[in-house]
Amino acid sequence: MPPVKPTMRSKRRYVLFSVECESQAGEQQVKRAAYDAILSFLGEYGSSLAGPRFIGFDQKRGLAVMRCSHSELDKVEAALALRAAIGGKKAAFRLKKVSGTIAGLSR
């Protein structure tokens, strides 16, 4: 199968957000909370349009990166910002930066 041409690929955005929690949250907890937030806010159809992918989590600094579709970026940001708990403990996702590349988040 030939590779997909750049003009046919979907545009993506990378969202950097911090995780503020009462207790230390692990990567799996943060990942599950982010997916649950998007699914509960957008529903199954909206979530499939957004195409969220959890990229990584730095536990020391409390920063996480998530990828989504550029057309659904506003909805994904809203879903993450509305999250109030992780694993039954008070928590918040604070949006820091949005970029078209992962390297752009570190600048």
Image (cartoon, helix red, strand yellow):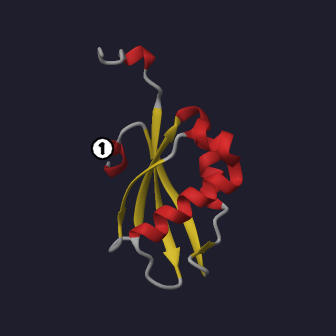
**Which residue: 46% across, 34% down?**
12
Q: Position of residue 80 (x, y in %)?
A: 60, 58
Which class describes the residues within 10 Å of circle 1: few (<14), some (14-19), or many (20+)? Answer: few
**Which residue: 32% across, 51% down?**
106
- Front residue of 26/72: it is 26
Q: Where 49 sits versus 34, above or below?
A: above
In this picture, residue 84 sits left or right of residue 34 = right
**Which residue: 62% across, 59% down?**
37
- Front residue of 106/36: it is 36
**Which residue: 30% across, 44% down?**
103
Q: Where 102 sits versus 49, above or below?
A: below
Question: SS class of the residue under badge 1?
Answer: helix
- Front residue of 48/92: it is 48
Q: Which residue is mark 1?
A: 103
Identify the residue at the far bottom of this view: 23
Quadrant housing residue 56: bottom left
Quadrant housing residue 26: bottom left
Q: Where 5 sits versus 87, above or below?
A: above
Q: Count the marks.
A: 1
Quadrant housing residue 58: bottom left
Q: Position of residue 27 (x, y in %)?
A: 40, 68
Three-letter amino acid code at the position of disc 1: Ala
Q: Position of residue 62 (x, y in %)?
A: 40, 70
Q: Quadrant of the N terminus?
A: top left
Q: Position of residue 71 (x, y in %)?
A: 59, 32
In this picture, residue 35 sits left or right of residue 42 = left
